Amino acid sequence: MIVSNVVQQGAEAVISLVDGKIVKERVEKGYRLKELDNKLRLRRTRGEAKILGKLSKVIDVPLVVEVDKFEIKMEFIDGMKLSEELENLDWREVCKKIGFLVGRMHDVGIVHGDLTTSNMIWKDGSEGENGLSGGKVYFIDFGLGFHSDKIEDKAVDLHLLKQALGAKHYGIAEGGEGDEKGKGGFEMVLEGYGADKRDEIIKRIEVIEKRGRYK
């Protein structure tokens, strides 16, 4: 018997848990010509699967099991979304690890496109490469991911994460008075971030922020 449960339904895709695997199906868009819609969904499905395959060699992501037209079947990561649990963990170490993983992702020319803690899963009871005893951070949902070696694109990725931490995790987003270690969540992300051209990327974040303020 096939056991299936819808986990999440969005504008672009339906994500279901089917017999212990995650199935992501890109939904049909009625406002587009059918031929064009099929081409776009097929290209994006294959593109996301390729990104996951490439990243699986350098960071923790769900392993792709099968790709069939508009569907990706992948490993189910039995863990907790960091959007809900970050403050309950050793968040400084977790944020530092996140930075390290983003750096590795950027170094192989992948930009996530939606880099928030909602797209990160913490899994207890294992140890990832280069640190964080007791657990791993998995990156998920590369539906907006793309290949790029541009400084700007990588800086935008990090800027989005900074905004997400400030909105969802405002209590730990910044250090300051009363914080014995002094560093907030995004500072710890940058401490762990060791990508090539790191300094240029971080400087570009400041430029992006200034652009936003003067719009």
Image (cartoon, helix red, strand yellow):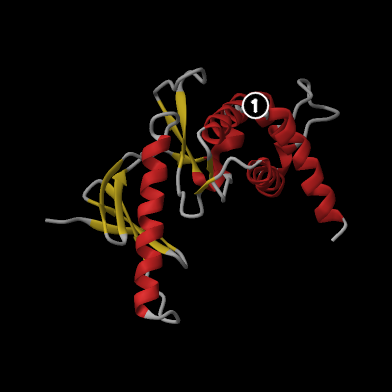
User: As drawn, which residue projects farthest toward the left?
Assistant: 1
Q: What residue is shown with label 1? A: 92
Q: Residue at x 61, y 28 (%)?
A: 195
Q: Looking at the picture, how far across and down is residue 89, in whole percent?
A: 56, 29
Residues packed near mark 1 inside 10 Å, few (<14), some (14 to 19) or many (20 plus): many
* Residue 122: percent from left, percent from top: 47, 34
Residue 193: quarter of image = top right
Q: Nearer the viewer, residue 178 or 98?
A: 98
The quadrant of the image that shows the C terminus is bottom right
Relative to 5, is 137 above or below?
above
Quarter of the figure that contains the N terminus:
bottom left
Q: How many marks?
A: 1
**Which residue occupies 82% across, 53% down?**
211
Q: Position of residue 66 (x, y in %)?
A: 24, 48
Residue at (45, 25) in percent of width and height: 135
Q: Amino acid at mark 1?
A: Arg
Q: Is residue 34 above or below residue 176?
A: below
- Outermost residue on the front side: it is 149
Asked whether residue 28 is in view, the answer is no
Q: Is residue 159 above or below residue 128?
A: below
Q: Can residue 85 be spotted in the picture?
A: yes
- Residue placed at 44% from the left, 22% from the top? 128
Relative to 32, 73 lies left or right:
left
Left or right placement of residue 126 versus residue 5 in this view: right
SS for dot 1: helix
Q: Is residue 125 above or below residue 51?
A: above
Residue 18 or residue 113, whichever sits in front: 113
Q: Residue 189 appears at what percent x and percent y?
A: 65, 31
- Along the viewing direction, whichever of 10 and 175 lies nearer the viewer: 10
Q: Does residue 166 appear to the left or right of 27 in the view shown?
A: right
